Image: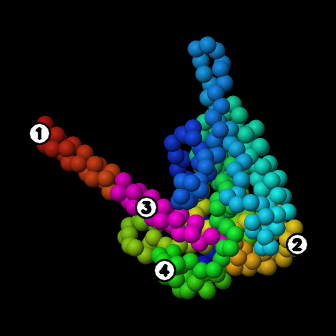
Amino acid sequence: MASSIALSPSTVPGQNQLLRSSFHGSALPPSAISLTSNKQIHHVSKTCLKITAKFDLKPPPYPLDALEPHMSRSTLEYHWGKHHRAYVDNLNRQIEGTELDELSLEDIILKTYNKGDLLPQFNNAAQIWNHDFLWESIKPGGGGKPTGELLELIERDFDSFEKFLEEFKSAAATQFGSGWAWLAYKDNTIGHPRPSEKDRKLVILKSPNAVNPLVWDYAPILTIDVWEHAYYLDFQNRRPDYISTFISNLISWEAADLRLQKAKVEAAEKAKEKEKKKTEDSDTDSSSSESDSDSE
């Protein structure tokens, strides 16, 4: 049976990008994803241009009252309009004029996570990403039960959908203090000595404060925010009631399914690249051995 786990941190920073998307783990349709980058070109001199990028506050993909009565307009105005906005404003101030100013949001997260020794910019960068991901994880008229391959994997990896719900609720309820609970896809076949289809599985994670699965090389599928500001106006200190309402009435299983499909494609591409590199290394070793033989 699967259980909630936390892993040792392991990160590999990606390549620099000027265009910054807040959806590394999201496979939502292009129309549902907008870049959180607003390029600004400042003329430094007649012959020199300095290009910087500013992160923008992206609104939820629905009106602020669309989730009522399960999540009130007041909560979204407070959660998105104040907390999410503060993360964006703070990060823009923190990275201005630094080497982070030209990185994507995901690269800033990985670089400032610093293998667990957090740099000052991490919390704001990760919280921007987490909240963009959260708003896409829910929808008006959500909840219910997934279908297709996502449901099949949940039933395979957690024995049943009902057991998955129990474990997901437990992870969200037992995350001490502020944090998040996640459903994520882990491709253990990369670097695994005995790869098998079973290794490509869904897992439940919980993370403190702003930490998210990206820093552990997981592909997040779904999340719930258990910071108190996510639910206090509607549920006061009744976190279990908020969690049950969130799962039963707000989850977008369609978004989760699209993210799963993207995670599988990316895992297959990584495996292909690994095999290609292995073949190239083998060919290089063979050529080197032949050269040594010829020289003798």
Residue 236 bears which disc, if any?
Answer: 2
Q: Is residue 48 above or below residue 262?
A: above
Q: Position of residue 217 (x, y in %)?
A: 54, 59
Report the coloring of the rendering. rainbow
Q: Cβ–Cβ below 8 Å for labels 4 and 2? A: no
Look at label 4 and name its amino acid.
Glu
Question: Is residue 268 located in the magenta-colored stretch of the structure?
Answer: yes
N-terminal of the two: label 4 or label 3? 4
What residue appears at the point 72 percent right and 48 percent down from the top-left corner? Answer: 57
| Mark 3 crowdedness (10 Å alpha carbons): few <14, some 14-19, many ≥20 | few
Position of residue 163 measured from the top left corner of the image (x, y, whole percent): 61, 85
Crowding at mark 2 (Cα within 10 Å: few <14, some 14-19, many 20+): few
The foreground one among 212 and 133 is: 133
Front of the two marks 2 and 1: 2
Find disc 3 in the rendering and name its residue: 265
Task: Give the main secondary structure, helix, strand or loop, of the magenta stretch.
Answer: helix
On the image, the x and y values in percent for residue 287 come to: 19, 44
- For image coordinates 38% across by 69% down, the residue present is 195
Separation of marks 4 and 1 at Cα, in angstroms: 56 Å
What secondary structure is marked by label 3? helix
Residue that label 4 marks: 152
**Extent of the magenta region:** 251-274
Q: Is residue 199 visible?
A: yes
